[in-house]
Amino acid sequence: MECRHELKATMKDPKRCLEDAADLYSYAYDASFGIFQPDLVLQPMSTEETAAIVKIANIHRVPLYPRGRGTSLSGGPLAVHGGVVLDFSLWDQKLEIHPDDMIAIVSPGVLTGSIDTAAGKHGLMYPPDPSSAHVSTIGGNLAENSGGPRGLKYGVTKDYVIGLEVVTPEGEVIRTGGKTVKNVTGYDLTKLIVGSEGTLGIVTEAILKLIPKPVATKTALVPFKDLVDSGKAISKILTSGILPSKMEIMDQSSLLAVEEYEPLGLPIHAEAVLLLELDGHPEAIAQEMEVVEKVCLDAGAEEVKVARDAIEERELWKARKLVSPAIVKIKPTKISEDATVPRSKIPEMFRRLKIIRDTYGVHLVVFGHAGDGNLHPNIIADQRDAEEMRRVEEAVGEIFKAAVELGGTLSGEHGIGVMKSPFMEMEVGKEGLDMMHRIKRAWDPNNVLNPGKIFPEPGQRLVLSNE
Ligand SMILES: Cc1cc2nc3c(=O)[nH]c(=O)nc-3n(C[C@H](O)[C@H](O)[C@H](O)COP(=O)(O)OP(=O)(O)OC[C@H]3O[C@@H](n4cnc5c(N)ncnc54)[C@H](O)[C@@H]3O)c2cc1C
């Protein structure tokens, strides 16, 4: 890289330039597949440093890969064409809560969970709650438009971003939106940047909307003998006029895995359990829970176990939190998908997933944010078994196909990255993909920012290996 010295000179502190083999290797991964080593890692901690790097990279056509904490499940921050990883995780100094405006102003490396904690001190809440909130950055969440269990009632990251500071792929600094909740001045560039997976701009500051924190919550665990009945119950609860703050599902394989990992007394004979939370005024949610109980029992639930206090509530949610660590005890490789379907199609999606599991003989576990149709079909496999991985690749392709055929989407929250780009055209069509390409070219004429993501490269197919 001929401009290495120029790039390194942008860092005020040389310790924030990493180029040892060991350092470079540790930035070659994220939480998905593939190992792609960058040529250099820079850790910018200001807008000026970031803009200076981008200007140099744009002149010399050096690929840049923004990175938060590398928890992406779609390969988003991987250096697939070599070049420079920009690690923003050190830049977490700015976390301002402005209670009177009900906003937070944050730098890109702030952990998402910290924003909600800081807002809570003022009786406010930052609702987006990816399960990775304690380890992922707001920059990464903005780029992926991350969601979480509370997305059912409160929406996802994009619903809470009202303003951004962005370094463009040519190194200019722009501001989008602002501090007001309403803003219709011109094109909504804020929303275009959110979810663009670090391909259109680098977020250097975000202004986030906060909302009042609900005073109370109530949680229930609802086991079903039949997985498809649990899907029907989800739709019935929502059409009964009640909007739970969370509605998550765990299938029998998830329950078994969690019980094996840490016995919690889960109903492992059930084909699925729903875990739901209501929030609001204590009297209102007590009445709503009665309605939920009736609806679930009518839909075939065995019982509705309502947590009596905060300790029992925490115990029930612990089961959901343990699914991910528990299932990797079965086999070491976890392919975590987030195919999402319209809510009425949840029962049909379950049926299709059962067929895919049997056809390809894969260990398929389903859990996730069922209330908004954002299921997480996870396949547990062993990457060392090439034959098994071939079956897994086919099964994953079939999962995407099923979701799109049912009117759904390839990704509800994990993004396209490298992993799902071969399937993009299937969902958005040739013309749709071409329009996205044109936007990318207009913003980033030299294809400097996060190349190799979202858009399929010629002949690209899904490969789940680290070769
Ligand atoms: C155990 C686990 C649970 C998870 N649970 C959820 C969940 O419930 N919901 C959910 O949505 N996701 C979830 N994820 C996925 C992941 O945590 C999110 O995608 C998260 O937003 C990534 O944040 P990060 O800081 O790790 O970013 P990275 O993984 O480092 O990067 C992600 C993307 O953001 C871009 N990026 C990073 N910083 C910037 C910036 N400042 N400007 C522009 N682009 C940038 C990168 O280029 C990349 O494309 C989970 C992951 C794990 C491992």
Image (tube, helix red, strand yellow):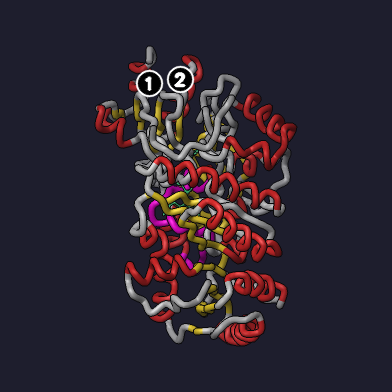
Residue 123 shown in magenta: yes
Residue 465, percent from left and from top: 42, 38
225 and 319: which one is in front? Answer: 225
Q: Residue at x 53, y 69 (%)?
A: 213
Residue 39 occupies quadrant:
top left
Q: Residues within 10 Å of mark 1 (few under 14, many from 20)?
A: many
Residue 264, percent from left and from top: 36, 76
142 lies above or below 225: above
84 lies above or below 368: above
- Determine whether label 1 and label 2 are within 8 Å by CB: yes
Q: What amino acid type should be assigned to the residue bearing mark 2? A: Val
Q: What amino acid type should be assigned to the residue bearing mark 1? A: Leu
Q: Residue at x 35, y 51 (%)?
A: 332
Q: Residue at x 59, y 48 (%)?
A: 411
Left or right, 412 with respect to 342, comes to left
- Note whether residue 207 is visible: no
Residue 277, percent from left and from top: 54, 74
Which residue in the structure is indicated by mark 2? Answer: 62
110 and 81: which one is in front? Answer: 81
Magenta span dominant secondary structure:
loop
Q: Residue at x 65, y 39 (%)?
A: 189
Residue 121, percent from left and from top: 43, 66
Which tag, 1 or 2, sits closer to the chain's start?
Answer: 1
Q: CA distance from mark 1 to mark 2?
A: 10 Å
Residue 40 shown in magenta: no
Image quadrant for the N terminus? top left
Q: Secondary structure at mark 2?
A: loop
Report the disc number at residue 7: 1
| Range shown magenta | 120-142
Image quadrant for the C terminus? top left
